Image (cartoon, coloured by chain):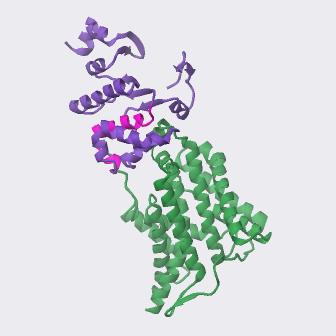
């Protein structure tokens, strides 16, 4: 994407135009749409890569334990090639890989894409727990409006790239126009 | 039977050499998806550097490791300066750049060192080892050992170190690697550096057998391609094993199929490339990428 106007700041620092590798080192973890799994590496290797930019490698063992606590299925399959996981498991792996950075901000791009409703619910439950328990800020982009509003504290509604409504999620949920157009009741 | 065994043994000896060049090819292919046609000439040039040092009175092993260090740095520099600008260009462009590099390195070596063949010393004793009636050349055995040692070190590096893991990741999925904070460009340059180093080892082991001259690698590179294709371009271990197989097959076919003899040996290598590509394109140990979506 080409920046045409405005700026992007994180923690009072200008980050637009900086190399991705440097932005990651500020503590921003990005779970891309399509998950970005290293399909030929094992689950454990994927997670090790998530922690690549960290300097405090001493705490890694504890973080692996914590991740396998959130995602028991990843613990069971840690020696398996990541490409052999199901779509839902790969999405969990993508979130887990991002958490291995111990980020201050977690960016999630359409985590529900192509997943069964039950799996989506499970992933959102974990994201909520991470947000509350680990005190990680989450920026979620999601077309699944009802689920997103349930999870978020604050929401922005974008139409063709422009913010048309923004406010606390509870307020957006009550907005008649949004309810009719996006929530379907 | 004795002739057969002797041919197998000397096939393994030359095969080890094909395998070590194939290993360097696979390294770059794995790290950057580029088939480096200049690999042989890079190895040849490194060997000339070692020759210069030896002529200046540097002890063999000092010259050996100094050459590896220089080769590594040159590999990194070549990637940064020559390959980087065409990184995102179509494969054909990169192939042409590599062939250009091949021709340049070849001519520069000829210009500096002349095209006259030079003897190159082996670090191993001259006396062959005999078991029963079969001769093992000490240099052949030593070279094979060195190749296997290099393979083992690479395996440990890629399998168990974080840097090795990051290099594998960068090769497979550059976009995700950046999102993990990996400096992908440098990983690719490191891949070229390592391949140049492995190539230099191969050059230093080959030169005592074929003599040192600017074209010493041209035939060997074709055997190396056959080895890497046979073993699988995605498998370092397969490349070395492929090299051993190519060496043995080449020798046996040359001995027992009368019309091939020594003149048509190189054709055997090309025929093997063709057959593997037709029957099993991923090679014996190569991986076919499988994705689940």
Q: Where is residue A156 in the image (x, y as percent from the top left)?
A: 38, 14
**Which of the pair B283/B157 is nearer the observer?**
B157
Whether residue B223 is visible: no
Q: Farthest residue toward the right?
A: B56
- Image quarter hosting the C terminus of chain B: top left
Q: Give the range drawn in magenta.
A: A80-102
**What is the x, y in percent for residue B120?**
70, 75
Residue sitting at x 55%, y 24%:
A15
| Residue at the image position 47 percent from the left and 35 percent from the top | B179
Tell me: residue B96, above or below residue A29.
below
Residue at image position (39%, 16%) is A160
Task: Reply above or below: A141 against B268.
Answer: above
In this figure, what is the number of numbered marks? 0
Q: Which image quarter: residue B38? A: bottom right
User: Would you place residue A30 above or below residue B19 in this image?
Assistant: above
At x 50%, y 32%, the residue is A24
Q: Residue furthest bottom?
A: B133
Percent x, y for residue B265? 52, 77
Chain ID for green: B
Colour of chain A, in one word, is: purple
Question: Horizontal placement of B68 versus B52: left or right?
Answer: left
Q: Is the magenta stretch mostly helix, strand or loop?
A: helix
Q: Dividing the picture into quarters, in which one does residue A157 lie?
A: top left
């Amino acid at each position: 994407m080409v920046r045409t106007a405005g700026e992007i700041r994180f923690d009072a620092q200008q980050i637009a135009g900086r190399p991705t590798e440097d932005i990651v080192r500020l503590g921003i973890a990005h779970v891309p749409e399509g998950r970005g799994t290293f399909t030929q590496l094992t689950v454990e290797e994927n997670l090790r890569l998530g922690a690549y930019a960290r300097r405090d490698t001493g705490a890694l063992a504890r973080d692996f334990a914590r991740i396998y606590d959130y995602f028991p299925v990843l613990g069971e399959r840690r020696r398996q090639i990541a490409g052999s996981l199901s779509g839902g498991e790969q999405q969990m792996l993508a979130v887990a890989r991002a958490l291995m950075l111990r980020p201050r901000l977690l960016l999630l791009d359409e985590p529900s894409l192509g997943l069964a409703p039950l799996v989506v619910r499970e992933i959102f439950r974990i994201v909520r727990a991470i947000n509350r328990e680990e005190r990680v800020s989450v920026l979620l982009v999601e077309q699944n409006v009802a689920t997103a509003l349930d999870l978020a504290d604050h929401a922005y509604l974008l139409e063709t790239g422009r913010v048309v409504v923004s406010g606390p999620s509870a307020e957006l949920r009550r907005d008649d126009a949004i309810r009719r157009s996006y929530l379907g009741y | 039977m004795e002739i057969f065994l002797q041919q197998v043994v000397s096939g393994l000896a030359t095969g080890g050499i094909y395998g070590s060049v194939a290993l360097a090819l696979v390294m770059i292919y794995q790290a950057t998806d580029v088939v480096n046609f200049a690999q042989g000439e890079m190895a040849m040039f490194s060997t000339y550097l070692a020759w210069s040092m030896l002529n200046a009175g540097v002890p063999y092993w000092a010259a050996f490791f100094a050459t590896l260090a220089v080769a590594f740095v040159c590999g990194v520099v070549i990637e940064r300066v020559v390959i980087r600008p065409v990184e995102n260009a179509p494969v054909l462009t990169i192939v042409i750049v590599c062939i250009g590099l091949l021709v340049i390195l070849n001519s520069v070596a000829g210009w500096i060192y002349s095209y006259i063949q030079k003897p190159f010393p082996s670090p191993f004793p001259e006396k062959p080892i005999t078991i029963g009636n079969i001769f093992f050349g000490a240099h052949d055995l030593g070279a094979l050992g060195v190749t296997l040692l290099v393979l083992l070190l690479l395996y440990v590096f890629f399998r168990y170190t974080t840097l090795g893991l990051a290099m594998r990741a960068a090769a497979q999925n550059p976009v995700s690697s950046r999102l993990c904070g990996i400096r992908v460009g440098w990983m690719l340059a490191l891949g070229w550096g390592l391949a140049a180093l492995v190539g230099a080892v191969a050059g230093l082991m080959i030169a005592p057998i074929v003599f040192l001259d600017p074209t010493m690698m041209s035939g060997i590179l074709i055997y190396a391609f056959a080895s890497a294709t046979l073993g699988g371009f995605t498998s370092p271990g397969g490349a070395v094993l492929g090299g051993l197989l190519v060496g043995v097959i080449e020798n046996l076919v040359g001995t027992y199929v009368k019309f091939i003899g020594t003149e048509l040996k190189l054709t055997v290598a090309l025929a093997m490339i063709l057959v593997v590509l037709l029957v099993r394109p991923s090679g014996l140990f190569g991986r076919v990428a499988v994705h689940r979506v």
